[in-house]
Image (cartoon, rainbow, N blue to C red):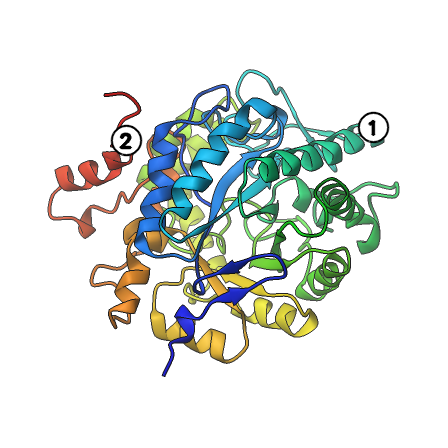
Amino acid sequence: MADVLFEPLKFRNLEIRNRLIRSNMSGRFDNYDGSGTQARINWETRFARGGVGAIISSFVPVHVRGRILPNYAMIDSDDKIPFWREVGERVREHGCKFILQLSHGGRQRDIAGIEVPEGWSSTAKPDPLHGFRAKAMSKIEIEEVVRQFGQAAVRAREAGVDGVELHGANGYLITQFLSSGINDRSDEYGGSLENRARFVIEIVRSIRARCGVDFHLQMKISATENNNAMSIGEPRGNTIQDSVRVCQWLEAEGVDAIHVSGGSSFPHPRNPAGDLPIDDFIRVYDSMISSGDHTFRNFLLLRNDITGTLFRERWLKERGDVIEGLNLADSEAIRKAVSIPVICTGGFQTASVIREAIRQGRCHAVSMARPLIANPDMPKMFEQGMDRPPVPCTYCNKCLVNVVENPLGCYDETRFTTREAMIADILSVFHPPAFP
């Protein structure tokens, strides 16, 4: 019998060879000015060689104001086109498609850089956890950002990538407009769900007007936000019922696929679901102390044995007991409400779990991030008949905590024979080097 994991998946304007997709993730591999480097090319081709059907790029800012960290490659100007063309061509050499994620952080960021004193957002309220300052966007500024998304999509198409994804999940700018827990506007971009969705609908229309209907466009959404998970007194935010309606509107506007995630911030107990490594968090959090009004307070609280333990315990409680496939109920609800393909993310690393989810119609494909950092060739393991990698991801989340200061990679020493072997694996992304 044919294995559903390795059946091609057809979108309206794109076909990928299997149902295993590398989700958006990357590290600070690039130059401060947003130009790309050989390290990022090495990073993306690593997963293409490993057998995924498609790669969704990391968070790619459409403007410097929208970046979450320095040293992330951007697509804010035409001079970035050749680099992304090279990335796409190198990925396709391995039979893998490359989808570029168009992104804007809004008020949510880790280290803003010298250019952005405060983030543009739907609200003037600072981020409740870190206290990142925000400015409520004027209508003129909204029009400007909508135009930036459209222009970025044109550049992506000119670069020859296989499609684009709007990052409308995990607390970034599009989420800040969509969310009933964040958006407190009283104009036509706030209030009702229809009004809160106006921003992303205008972005979709801008992209379609500039790129036509034959260019792949998908949307990543936090289907259930749980906005009050770590901030007592905050509203709950959007529910799955809200998100189903938004996805139906997006389909009507010409979006080709929905990518289902969760949580109204990043990080969030349910995204990425896993542990909160306090020691690692303390070690890198000092880099963020000047970024937000609450960051120094948080640093002191995390360093205290009592408050640090209480914070981690709340994190684990809000996370819940399920990690692998925790978004499947939401993706199934959206799958039943739209006719376009639905991709689900959420800790997938067991072939039988993925197979059953697809066979039951809960999603058409899955996307994976941390499990592929741990095992970049996991799709090939599945092809060989393995149900799970011999040394699976432990969901320790040390990879995503360390990325603020260090190269992205697996930082769980228990998965390696020695610490030196772990470091060598992390640094392997810098080989081959850019210059001989």
Residue picked out by circle 1: 140
| Quadrant of residue 406 within the rendered picture | top left
Mark pair 1, 2: CA separation: 42 Å
- Residue neighbourhood size for the residue with mark 2, other residues' Cα within 10 Å, grouped as few (<14), some (14–19), many (≥20): some
Q: Is residue 161 left or right of residue 203?
A: left
The amino acid type, in three-letter code, at marker 2 is Phe
- Residue neighbourhood size for the residue with mark 1, other residues' Cα within 10 Å, grouped as few (<14), some (14–19), many (≥20): few
Residue picked out by circle 2: 430
Q: Is residue 396 visible?
A: no
The amino acid type, in three-letter code, at marker 1 is Ile
Question: Which residue occupies the foreground of this view, 378 or 221?
Answer: 378
The local secondary structure at tag 1 comes to helix
Q: Which mark is residue 18?
A: none
Q: Is residue 273 left or right of residue 112?
A: left
At 28% from the left and 62% from the top, the residue drawn is 380
Reply above or below: 229 against 18. Answer: above
Reply above or below: 80 against 21. Answer: above
Question: Which residue occupies the foreground of this view, 150 or 231?
Answer: 150
| Quadrant of residue 36 within the rendered picture | top left
